[in-house]
C-alpha cells in the first residue's frame, strides 16, 4: 500500500472518530441535573452552549434581562423549550409569541425570527429539519405547553411523538401513579425533561428521584427504568447515530 493511501486511510479514520466524538452529548450522565440552574444568565449577555452537534443539534441558551437575538431567516425549524424565565419570539408584521417556563414553540422557516427577553430566560433549542415528521397537533408559530400535550389516564402510560426522523425522536409521556417502563438499554443518548409531578429513574443500578423542572441524561447503552411514584409527565429527546 502506498504512503498516499495510508495517509488517506488514516485521515478518513481520524475524521470518522472526530465526528463521532463531536456528536456525543456534552452533558453529565447518570444523575439528576437542571438545565435552568446550570445555565444562569450573565448580566448584559446572551450565552449559547451546544451540547449536541448532530443534524438535529441541541443548544442551551441563557439570555440576560433586556437582551435579544436579532431576527434572522432560517431554513430549518427550531423547537424552543423554556426552562426558566420568560421570552418573546418575534418576526415580521407584528408577529410576537410570548413564552414562560414550560412553554414551547416551533419557529417559522424562511422568515425572520428573533428572540428577546425583558426579565431573563433559559431555554433549549433543538434544530428540526423540514423533512422531519412533526405531529399534526403541533403547529409552527404557535405556543404550546409540553405538559399539556398528553393527558393522564388511569392505570395507563400515554405517549406522543412530537417530532422524529431516523436519527432523533422527541416524545412526551404521561404516567399514572404506579405505572412505569421496565428496565431496558438506551439505543442512543437521551435527555429527559421532567414536566409534571414526580418520578423515579433507575439508571445502572441506582434510583434517582426526579421532579418537574429537572433533567436526566442517559448514555447510549445505559440500562434504565422509569417509575411514577406520583402522577408523572416527561419529555424524552433521543438521538440515534
Image: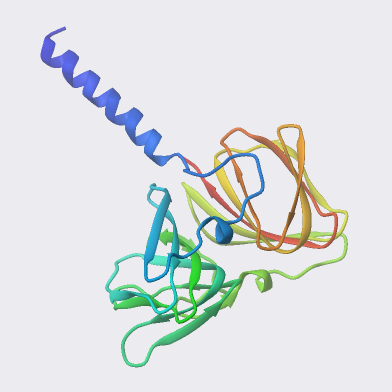
Is residue 57 in sight in this rendering? no
Question: In this view of the protein, which residue sits in the foreground, 105 or 86?
Answer: 86
Is residue 17 in sight in this rendering? yes
Q: Position of residue 12 (x, y in %)?
A: 25, 26
User: In the image, is residue 6 above or below residue 78?
Assistant: above
Image quadrant for the C terminus? top left
Image quadrant for the N terminus? top left
User: In the image, is residue 240 above or below residue 119?
Assistant: above
Q: Position of residue 120 (x, y in %)?
A: 48, 74
Q: Position of residue 227 (x, y in %)?
A: 80, 49
Q: Residue at x 50, y 80 (%)?
A: 142
Q: Position of residue 70 (x, y in %)?
A: 30, 75
User: In the image, is residue 196 above or below residue 179?
Assistant: below
Question: In this view of the protein, which residue sits in the foreground, 184 or 42?
Answer: 42
Left or right: residue 60 compared with residue 156? left
In the picture, residue 107 is in which quadrant? bottom left
Amino acid at each position: 500500500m502506498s504512503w498516499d493511501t495510508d495517509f488517506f486511510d488514516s485521515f478518513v479514520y481520524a475524521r470518522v472518530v472526530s465526528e463521532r466524538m463531536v456528536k456525543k452529548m456534552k452533558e453529565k450522565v447518570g444523575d439528576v441535573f437542571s438545565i435552568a440552574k446550570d445555565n444562569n444568565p450573565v448580566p448584559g449577555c446572551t450565552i449559547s452552549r451546544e451540547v449536541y452537534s448532530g443534524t438535529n443539534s441541541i443548544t442551551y441558551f441563557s439570555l440576560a434581562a433586556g437582551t435579544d437575538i436579532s431576527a434572522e431567516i432560517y431554513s430549518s425549524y427550531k423547537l424552543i423549550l423554556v426552562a426558566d424565565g420568560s421570552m418573546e419570539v418575534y418576526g415580521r408584521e407584528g408577529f410576537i409569541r410570548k413564552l414562560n417556563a414550560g412553554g414551547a414553540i416551533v419557529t417559522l422557516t424562511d422568515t425572520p425570527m428573533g428572540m428577546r427577553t425583558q426579565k431573563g430566560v433559559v431555554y433549549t433549542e433543538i434544530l428540526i429539519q423540514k423533512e422531519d415528521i412533526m405531529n399534526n397537533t403541533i403547529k409552527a408559530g404557535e405556543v404550546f405547553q409540553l405538559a399539556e400535550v398528553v393527558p393522564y389516564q388511569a392505570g395507563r402510560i400515554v405517549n406522543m411523538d412530537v417530532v422524529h426522523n431516523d436519527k432523533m425522536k422527541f416524545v412526551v409521556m404521561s404516567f399514572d401513579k404506579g405505572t412505569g417502563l421496565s428496565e431496558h438499554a438506551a439505543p442512543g443518548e437521551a435527555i429527559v425533561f421532567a414536566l409534571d409531578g414526580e418520578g423515579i429513574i433507575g439508571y445502572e443500578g441506582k434510583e434517582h428521584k426526579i421532579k418537574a423542572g429537572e433533567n436526566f441524561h442517559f448514555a447510549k447503552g445505559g440500562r434504565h427504568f422509569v417509575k411514577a411514584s406520583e402522577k408523572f409527565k416527561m419529555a424524552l429527546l433521543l438521538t440515534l447515530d
